[in-house]
Image: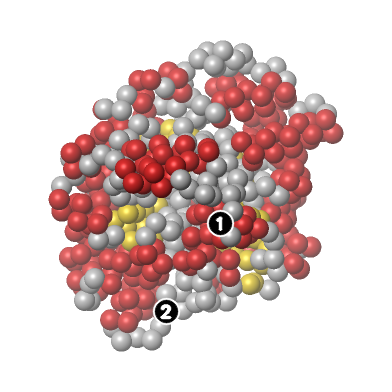
Amino acid sequence: MESTIQDVLSIVKSPNMTVQQKLIGLGNTSERLFSPIELLGYTEEEMSYLNNQMICDLNEGYALYRPRYIVPDYGVFIEKGCEFLEIDPPKDLDECLDGLLILYTHVPSITSFPVFIGHLDRLMEPFMRDETEDYVKIKRFLNHIDKTITDSFCHADIGPYETTAGKLILKAVMELKNPTPNMTIRYDKDKTSRSFAELAAKSCLLVSKPSFSNDVSYNKDVGDHALCSCYNALPFAGGAYTLLRLRLGTIARAAASLEVLLKELLPEVAGHMLSMMDKRIKFIVEESNFFESSFLQEEGFIDKDNFTAMFAIIGLADAVNAMLIAEGLDETFGQSARGDIIGHQIMQLLEKLVNSHKGQYVERTGGHYLLHAQVGAALHEEDTMNTPAHRVKVGQEPILIDHLKHSAPFHQYFPSGTGDLFAFDQTYVDHPDAVVDIIDGAFSSGYRYITTYMKNTDLIRVTGYLVKKSEVEKLRKNQVVLRDTTVFGMGTDDNNQVFDRKLRQ
């Protein structure tokens, strides 16, 4: 969405933004002052689908000066240090943690903060010497991140193997109860010890992290990768240039029938979004000079050849529900056999369209963009009618076993990330083994990513990121809050009631 000079003044005068939030907001607003027709070569027809809200660009901007997601190989620092920052390779845990904190301030992204801060246990493990002393340092390191990277799209990975560092990280995460960093355990039951998995499951219940990713599935489809931002699986030492999303619910409501949706409207809109992605990538690579000026590229933290792009959807549930109404059925997505058939027809069409499109500068993923199940955002009133990703609308969820069976087959379509969330009651904290059994069953059924949490905690996973309910309440009272993701959590809850997901007992 293009911005105006008045948007600049609105940010300057905002009563509930910190100076840092205003600075970032002003930067984003300035990127959107340019006409995408003049700067990127968008056509009038492409703009019409942005303006009618069928395509959403998530306010990425048009004067693009860096890729949306950057996934550095921080192992380069461990091995060689960083010449640009004049940091030698670390010799102990103190130097390791200090060097990483310095590096994080120089890793850009769409949020202006790093969306990936490393496979932390692998980076720290060579420096483990004394668990008591090391734990104090790790806890201080994680707390520093939460207070300086004030955006919970910042993501760390651990696993799949059990390590001393991994266990200390989980202990600190449970004690700190901080939203940042978001965290994933790369889980493979053949590599991850049962005790480590159960410790991670307990942590996930208590503080909504780490989520569990299916490491076998993602290694097969993405190769060497990392989980970043919400739950995005992206090439390691690379990332993603851009992410645009289709509002499937909005598109479907404009179609008179499923035939019109599948044969006319959806191919038309998807084709225009692919064309817009082409133009955005071309500008980043050929005109922004990001890769020519970045020490991350120069010193091997990233490689331009490891980048891809994300073709995202939201509102599959709303699109299916609209088609069920058109067919005269009083049923809803998640509890309708016909609804599942329609959902798969929509996704199979999109998969065919995306995989048949050849993109430039994405050789790492076979010259193709990757489908992504986007978590949602409150950017327009249309977002109130588009449920995140392919998830079942809150209030229409089936019982747990039926929910898992329904959603598992949809995970196959999204190699660059998807996930489902389930709220459990207090009794599961004493039975993390039961949670791991559920996760094993989900992964064997096709799940790529799953999160559990306790419904009555202050720290809660919204869709793919975490917020504190207490911070959301402060923002609702127009008070200033530390983290800029709190406003996204508030908007997503207002739109989709995500704080009220079905309780699994």
Where is residue 258 shown, x and y percent of the image?
A: 25, 74
- Amino acid type of disc 2? Thr
- Residue positioned 41% across, 67% down in the render: 384
Residue 411 seen in this snapshot: no
- Residue positioned 34% across, 46% down in the render: 6
Where is residue 336 shown, x and y percent of the image?
A: 42, 79
Q: Secondary structure at mark 1?
A: loop
- How many labels were placed on the picture? 2
- Position of the C terminus by quadrant: bottom right
Residue 411 position (above or below residue 170):
below
Q: Which mark is residue 365?
A: none
Residue 106 position (above or below residue 362):
above
Camera-nearest label, 1 or 2? 1
In this picture, residue 63 sits left or right of residue 117? left
Q: Which mark is residue 332?
A: 2
For label 1, the residue is: 478
Q: Residues within 10 Å of mark 1 (few under 14, many from 20)?
A: few
Marked residue nearer the N-terminal end (1 or 2): 2
Which residue is nearer to you in this view: 68 or 371? 68
Which residue is nearer to you in this view: 19 or 62? 19
- Residue positioned 52% across, 13% down in the render: 83
Where is residue 178 shown, x and y percent of the image?
A: 67, 47
The picture quadrant where one finds residue 131 is top right
Q: Secondary structure at mark 2?
A: loop
